[in-house]
Image (cartoon, helix red, strand yellow):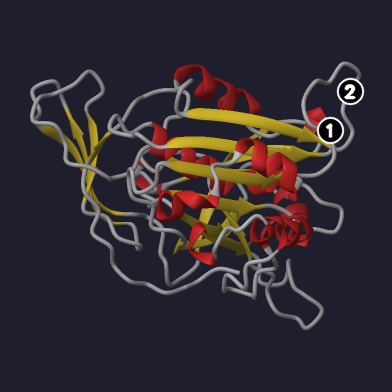
Amino acid sequence: MFSFASSTRQLGRTQLFRTAARRCYATETAPKKPSNAPLYFMGAGVAGLGAYYYLNATGKSVITQEKSPLDPENFKDFKLKKIIPYNHNTSEFVFELPNNEASLLPVASCIVVKSSDPEALKDDKGKPIIRPYTPISPPEQQGELTLLVKKYDNGNASKHIHELKEGDTLSIKGPIPKFPYKANEFDEVALIGGGSGITPLYQLVTHALSNRSNRTKFTLLFSNVTEADILLKSEFEALKKKYPTKFDVIYILDKPPAGWTGPTGYISKELIQQHVAPPSLNEKVKVFVCGPPGQVAAVAGKKAGMKQGELGGALKELGYTEDQVYKF
């Protein structure tokens, strides 16, 4: 599902807002004057290499970080610092980064994880089970890397992570580059997600909206079984309140509660037509999709292993092209 290519991309600088979204990564030239939130990144590639600067009120650098503590080529063990229950089947797992360093994960990218114990998490052939996750902590957050993990009955990796205790370790490799997002490359972006597949979309939208120069409008269609299953809802509501003209979210439920006024069932062609910018915008519209395999196939066609696969499903029927769609 994930590409392990390691090409280097030069990123510019961007100003970070310290908000509930808490996310930004280099996309634009830093202003000459200091601001009230003076935190900048510059020169980071897919390996998380580069420099991390904290500028004080006078614009002088007081903290630097030369590279990410993560390794894109090798697994490294990281200690589980704390577990924060989120809902009935999901928790936040906060891992400690050495020397109070930041992860410096570029957007969009993920990590892959496996058990620190080579005998603890294997498939039927005796090979280590490796799974991708997208952290919800911002790349500039010092000392911590946070994964939001939903426990699935048939999910060996998720069950293993939920069995970890504070002080245990998990083996992590990354960053694994996904889509090289550029500020204002698109006028309209649709994010179509389901269940725990929301984390790559969350990474992307929080990064983009925190950029002062952002002009792109984002619309999230987020489907879940019940209202209790909606992950990061408070964060999305905070984004909607702060960026009312640049972000909107529509929740879709399979089993809605009494009094639910939003859409129900699955993400249909009609729902996409109602909320997503039309394919006639050509290169100015982009649709990002992430969710359970069945949902991805119905919306955009199946992925082909680590490759995108042919475009299919509702988006193809509506006239979108492969260049307009990206499947995480």
Asked if one can make out residue 161 in the rendered structure from this viewpoint, the answer is: yes
User: Is 60 displayed left or right of 71 in the figure?
Assistant: left
Can residue 95 be seen in the rendering of this structure?
no
Which residue is under mark 2?
Answer: 257
Q: CA distance from mark 1 to mark 2?
A: 8 Å
Which residue, as the protein is rendered here, is positioned at the far front?
A: 280
Task: Say if 59 sits above or below 289 in the image.
Answer: above
In the image, is 160 to the left or to the right of 284?
right
Direction from residue 131 to residue 204 in the image, left or right: left
Q: Quadrant of the N terminus?
A: bottom right
Label 2 is placed on what type of residue? Pro
Between 252 and 198, the one nearer to me in the picture: 252
Position in image of residue 274 (x %, y %): 66, 36
Label 2 crowd bin: few (<14), some (14–19), many (20+), radius 10 Å:
few
Please give the count of numbered marks on the rendered protein. Answer: 2
* Image coordinates for residue 318, horizontal then vertical, percent: 65, 55
Marks 1 and 2, the one that precedes in the sequence: 1
Instruction: Tell me residue 18's x, y (percent).
Output: 36, 24
- What numbered label is drawn on residue 180? none
Q: Position of residue 296 (x, y in %)?
A: 70, 58
Q: Residue at x 76, y 58 (%)?
A: 298
Residue at image coords 80%, 29%: 228
Assign a secondary structure to mark 2: loop
> Mark 2 and mark 1 in contact (Cβ < 8 Å)?
yes
Near-viewer residue (300 or 31): 300
Q: Nearer the viewer, residue 298 or 99?
A: 298
The picture quadrant where one finds residue 62 is top left
Which residue position is annotated with label 1?
Answer: 226
